[in-house]
Amino acid sequence: MSPGRWLVPAGLGAGLAWHGLPALTSMGPLRTRLAPALAGAGDPGHVALTFDDGPHPASTPRFLAELDRLGVRATFFLTGRWAARVPGLAAEVAAAGHEVAVHGYDHRCLLLRGPRATYDDVARGRDAVTHATGVVPRWYRPPYGVLTGAGLTAAARLGLTPMLWTAWGRDWEYGASPESVHRTVLADLSGGGTVLLHDSDVTSTPDSWRATLAAVPVIVQTLRERGLRVGPLAAHGVPRR
């Protein structure tokens, strides 16, 4: 049997590389070092606070209330499906002074989607968020933080800037606690960083948002004690494409 039979055709190999290589940015240390703007590196005196996977009626209102009590505004990466399902709640997020952004329509990994399906998902998500909130979103975060060539192309065509993160709380995991979320966020966070948390458990361990909610005031207090301001990406000084 000829070894050449197992070789990937040149055109197909190039296409797979174009599609899949951006997914390497899902590796946090590599992303922060090689693509700081994509990772959300901004003003060294500021930390951007972001939440994914909402809006959800069981949890998002509690985050809005807690952030209001703290006097903090954040960026919410909304899933289009839930924005369409509970448009009034999505509108409340924006009305409370928070920045709304796009997390796609369905929470599916882009590596499993081709160019047309990727574009349709991002466009549908953008339109759902815009329709529900009356705000045209600026940022796009792919599900699981996995970018592809098709995802980057779709974002560019739709006027969206891809945005990942420099620190997360691993708050979706089974057994996450307020203490573990706080500890994990602060382990990788410094001034100019962007924090990823979740205000919903629709793609996480059930009720995982409760640990996140309890961790938020401690995280904010710690950052303020370090002399850092906390706010949305709009105040973070990250360049837009």
Image: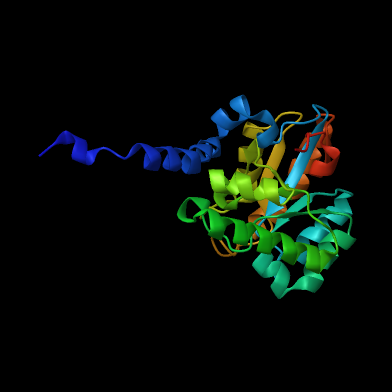
Q: How many marks?
A: 0
The image quadrant of residue 81 is: bottom right
The image quadrant of residue 34 is: top right
Left/right placement of residue 119 relative to residue 75 reads left
For the residue pair 44 and 70, the one nearer the viewer reads as 44
Q: Residue at x 59, y 65 (%)?
A: 202
Residue 208 seen in this snapshot = no
Q: In this view, does 16 lie above or below 82?
A: above
Q: Residue at x 61, y 56 (%)?
A: 119
The quadrant in which the N terminus is found is top left
The picture places residue 74, in percent across and down from the top left corner, at 80, 49
Q: Which colour scheme is used?
A: rainbow
Q: Which residue is drawn at 62% across and 32% down?
A: 187
The picture places residue 73, in percent across and down from the top left corner, at 85, 49
The quadrant in which the C terminus is found is top right
Q: Residue at x 82, y 61 (%)?
A: 93
For the residue pair 189 and 142, the one nearer the viewer reads as 142
Residue at the far front: name it. 11
Q: Is residue 128 above or below residue 20?
A: below
Residue 24 seen in this snapshot = yes
Left/right placement of residue 50 relative to residue 206 reads right
For the residue pair 232 and 124, the one nearer the viewer reads as 124
The picture places residue 179, in percent across and down from the top left corner, at 63, 45
The picture places residue 65, in percent across and down from the top left corner, at 83, 61
Q: In this view, does 219 lie above or below 115?
A: above
